[in-house]
Amino acid sequence: LADEIFSKRKKFLGSSLFHYYQNPLNIVEGKMQYLFDENGRRYLDAFAGIVTVSCGHCHPEVLNAIIEQSKLLQHATTIYLHHAIADFAESLASKMPGNLKVVYFVNSGSEANELAMLMARLYTGNLGMISLRNAYHGGSSSTIGLTALNTWKYPIPEGEIHHAVNPDPYHGVFGSDANSYAKDVQDHIDYGTSGKVAGFIAETIQGVGGTVELAPGYLKLVYDIVHKAGGVCIADEVQTGFGRTGSHYWGFETQGVIPDIVTMAKGIGNGLPLGAVVTTPEIASVLAQKIQFNTFGGNPVCSAGGLAVLRVIDKEKRQSHCADVGSHLLEGLRSLMQRHDIIGDVRGRGLMVGVEFVTDRKEKTPAKAETAVMFEKLRELGILIGKGGLHGNVFRIKPPMCFSKDDADFVVDALDYAISKL
Ligand code: PMP
């Protein structure tokens, strides 16, 4: 069956689609932190459909909310009233700090970042956007310019987007020196935008780029710089939001800042196509005299599902669970690092963890081939993991938030074994 699907996919779907594993895996069912293939083989899912399945695959309460709403009404658009979108917006706004109270629903992370960029530009009257190197903010026509990964570049003008040095404590030229990285943002504002900055956008832990935690204190310094220059600050919480970092509900809280605009997607819908932008009434007012419309944004089914996701995360105490299981996982991985030189770095927070493999710890030479071998090995052992970083030499462990300590131990033991077999 997998072969048949693969040949159809090659024939009828764009060749830009990529797949994991030498023999592509055909997934037919999901149950909480497990996925099942066509032969009924169970896999531990350590990547959650790219950090998306927050509560768990087919989580009963989320599933029930989707089914019940689907039976009643699937779609009508916001030209009519519907309680689900209003209840969902109220619940989401209650999760936000400060004056972040106005919600827009869209269908994906790219759309959320497009809208955030539009708001920043309209609000400030400037065009210049600053994002960080190594960032992923989307694949749509304008967010692809914010995305600063070499594999995602196209030979088309990005239009007034500048990429600042990412404050990566492991690889970065300034180590953990937040001041020097922040100065680079100031330079981009002064020389890149001639002082006319619309907005600064950053993930609070870079996801696709390889789970890179920004140097401590960085966002505080940069938000100050951007605000002084008249720009707005956007936090991309597409991967880091909803308690995944364990210590906080939102990633930006780990840096002690409150953004002007927050974008979210992925985990907000547990797999439903859903995204959101939350901002202040003042910034939102720039769209007041315009029509900002999204046919599917906040449709009844996604809203009911999203509302259930927020409820489940609270009810099942998923944030503190991520903190507990995440620190257990990090501890296990760090003890592996003491025994295996191939592990160059273990980093992250909560259930957003990265393991970087190098052939030489001092030079940090990417162990690209070895990572690929271990990646296949883990599949063989029944674990599906994520891969990322500039050279594909970082394992990304970002499972559904119901992942247990036993699951974490299984991953650590399997990785230990995979390394020993290299
Ligand atoms: N922002 C971040 C941080 C992401 O990781 C992604 C997706 N990988 C996006 C935005 C874009 O989201 P989508 O694929 O839903 O458009």
Image (cartoon, rainbow, N blue to C red):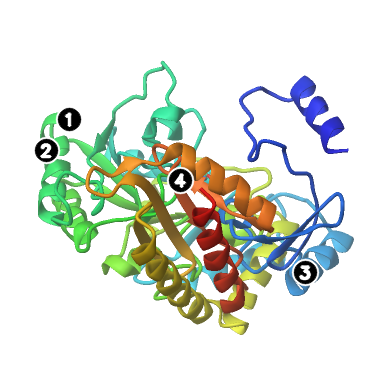
Instruction: Residue 145: give x, y in percent of width and height.
Output: 39, 30
Instruction: Look at the numbered disc 4 and say if its residue's Cβ is closer than 8 Å to ligand 1.
Output: yes
Q: Secondary structure at mark 3?
A: helix
**Residue at image x 84%, y 58%?**
73
Instruction: Look at the numbered disc 3 and say if its residue's Cβ is closer than 8 Å to ligand 1.
Output: no
Q: Which residue is mark 3?
A: 65
Q: Which residue is mark 1?
A: 192
**Viewer-nearest residue: 21 or 323:** 21
Mark 2: give few (<14), some (14-19) or many (20+) Cα within 10 Å.
some
Amino acid type, callout 2: Asp
Whether label 2 touches label 1, CB < 8 Å: yes
Quadrant position of residue 220: bottom left
Q: Secondary structure at mark 4?
A: loop
Mark 4: give few (<14), some (14-19) or many (20+) Cα within 10 Å.
many
Label 2 vs 1, first from the N-terminus: 2
Q: Which residue is situated farthest in the top direction here?
A: 155
Residue 208 has which mark? Answer: 4
Instruction: Residue 86: give x, y in percent of width and height.
Output: 63, 66
Quadrant position of residue 389: top left
**Residue at image x 70%, y 67%?**
83
Residue 187 has which mark? Answer: 2
In space, the residues marked 2 and 1 are separated at their CA atoms by 7 Å
In space, the residues marked 1 and 4 are separated at their CA atoms by 26 Å
Q: Is residue 374 left or right of residue 6?
A: left
In space, the residues marked 4 and 2 are separated at their CA atoms by 26 Å
Label 1 vs 3, first from the N-terminus: 3
Amino acid type, callout 1: Gly
**Which tag is nearer the camera, tag 1 or tag 4?**
4
Label 3 vs 4, first from the N-terminus: 3
Whether label 1 touches label 3, CB < 8 Å: no
Q: Secondary structure at mark 2?
A: helix
Amino acid type, callout 4: Val
